[in-house]
Structures are given as C-alpha cells and as structure tokens.
Amino acid sequence: MFTPLLLSLVMISGPSEPVIVVDERPTIQIILADYDLGRPEDVRRLERKIRWAADRVCIGGSGLAMYLESRPCLEGAVADANSQLTIMLAQHRSGTLVAGSIAVTAHSH
C-alpha cells in the first residue's frame, strides 16, 4: 500500500517538486538554492511557493467543501513552513546559513 501511494503522489506532483511521504504525511521539500534570502522579492516568491506547496499536500480535490475541509491542514502547513523560513532568514542575516530547505508537510485535519 505504501509504495503505490508514494508513486501516485510523485506522479501527480510532476518532476520539479515531488511530493514525498514523511511519517505518513505528504511533504514537499523546497530547496533554498534558488532564492536569495537577502532580496525581499525572493522572500515573497518563497512565501508564495510555501503556499503553493501547502495547497499541493493538503487539498485532495476541488470545490469549496474540499477547500474548507482542508483549511486546518493548510493553516498548519503554512505556519510550520513560515516558522522554518523565519529561522532561515535569521541564519542568513547572521551569516550562518550555508544551505537549506523548507519542508512543507500536511497536518492532520
């Protein structure tokens, strides 16, 4: 069961940002190499990418009912990823950030 689920998630997500399963929760890893955290426009672009990734791991269909049902997952995934981003920004400002990524993970409904 695990392998078909994982494979179906990877095929749906496409090659650029695969959805992986961590502790049975869908996750998208955003690599920070494509972003200059010293540029506000790149930080905004990263925040949009976090929201996009949360949509991918949390919303399993379309329509208002599906969106409303997935809202707690979306809020949790975005909040967690934004916390990671805050840490990364602080490390970048202090010069201690070498490389990194942000994990956007589905939260239980």
Image (cartoon, helix red, strand yellow):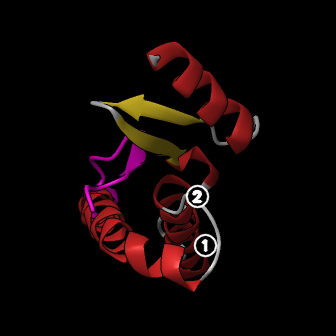
- The residue at 28%/57% (across/down) is 84
Question: Can you tell which quarter of the image residue 61 is in?
Answer: bottom right
Q: Which residue is mark 2?
A: 35
Question: Can you tell which quarter of the image residue 17 is in?
Answer: top right
Q: Are marks 2 and 1 in contact (CB under 8 Å)?
A: yes
Q: Position of residue 87 (x, y in %)?
A: 23, 60
Q: Is residue 44 above or below residue 13?
A: below
- The residue at 50%/44% (across/down) is 28
Q: How many other residues sit within 10 Å of disc 1, few (<14), some (14-19) or many (≥20)? A: few
The magenta stretch spans which residues? Answer: 91-109
> Looking at numbered disc 1 in the image, what kind of residue is underneath it?
Arg
Q: Position of residue 64 (x, y in %)?
A: 56, 85
Query: Would residue 25 appear left or right of 39 to someone viewing this image?
Result: left
Disc on res. 105: none
Q: How many other residues sit within 10 Å of disc 2, few (<14), some (14-19) or many (≥20)? A: some
Q: Nearer the viewer, residue 102 or 109?
A: 109
Q: Which residue is mark 1?
A: 45
Q: Label 1's element?
A: helix
> Looking at numbered disc 2 in the image, what kind of residue is underneath it?
Tyr
Q: Is residue 89 above or below residue 39?
A: above
Query: Would residue 82 appear left or right of 31 to someone viewing this image?
Result: left
Query: Would residue 1 appear left or right of 9 to someone viewing this image?
Result: left
Q: Position of residue 66 (x, y in %)?
A: 51, 73
- The residue at 63%/79% (across/down) is 63
